[in-house]
Image (tube, rainbow, N blue to C red):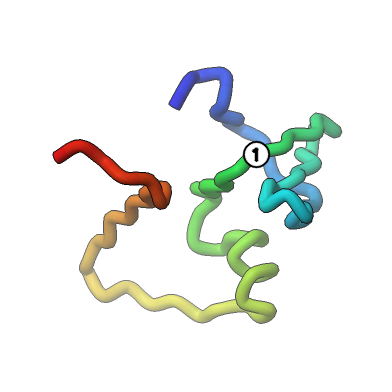
Amino acid sequence: INDSDLYWGTSIKCWRQCSDKTIELELDNNRRVRCRWLIAADGIHSRLRQDMQGKATAFRSTGQYCWRMLVDDVEHNN
């Protein structure tokens, strides 16, 4: 990922899925961004997570950590 594709210290005001399978975002600094993948590292009380699930989720600490990775649906060598 290029540094120019990362948006630090900002929040998503609103977003929508477009017909061409891209995602259009409006950030809290009024910048508009269009992307294919949205990876939001906005914490446990994520507004985006709440939008996707349709409700607030109660979390509890289990002392475990989770690592996530997204892989595009293309063939890879090796």
Residue 62, position in %: x, y? 26, 75
Horizontally, residue 65 falls left or right of residue 25, namely: left
In the picture, measured across the screen, residue 18 lies left or right of residue 70, that is right
Q: Percent position (x, y) of residue 20?
A: 73, 49
Q: Is residue 49 above or below residue 72?
A: below
Identify the secondary structure beneath mark 1.
strand
Name which quarter of the figure residue 53 lies in.
bottom right
- In the image, is residue 67 above or below residue 58? above
Please state which of residues 72 and 70 is positioned toward the viewer in this rendering: 72
Query: At x 32% / y 73%, what residue is drawn?
Result: 61
Mark 1: amino acid: Cys
Q: Which residue is mark 1?
A: 35
Residue 9 position by quadrant:
top right
Q: Quadrant of the N terminus?
A: top left
In the image, residue 77 sits, relative to residue 50, either above or below, namely above
Q: Nearer the viewer, residue 28 or 14?
A: 14
Is 72 in front, or is 74?
A: 74
Relative image position of residue 28 (x, y in whole percent): 79, 39
Residue 37 lies in quadrant: top right
Which residue lies at the image location 56% right of the left edge and 26% below the top edge?
5
Q: Residue furthest left?
A: 78
- Image position of 46 (left or right of 29): left
Q: Residue at x 14, y 40 (%)?
A: 78
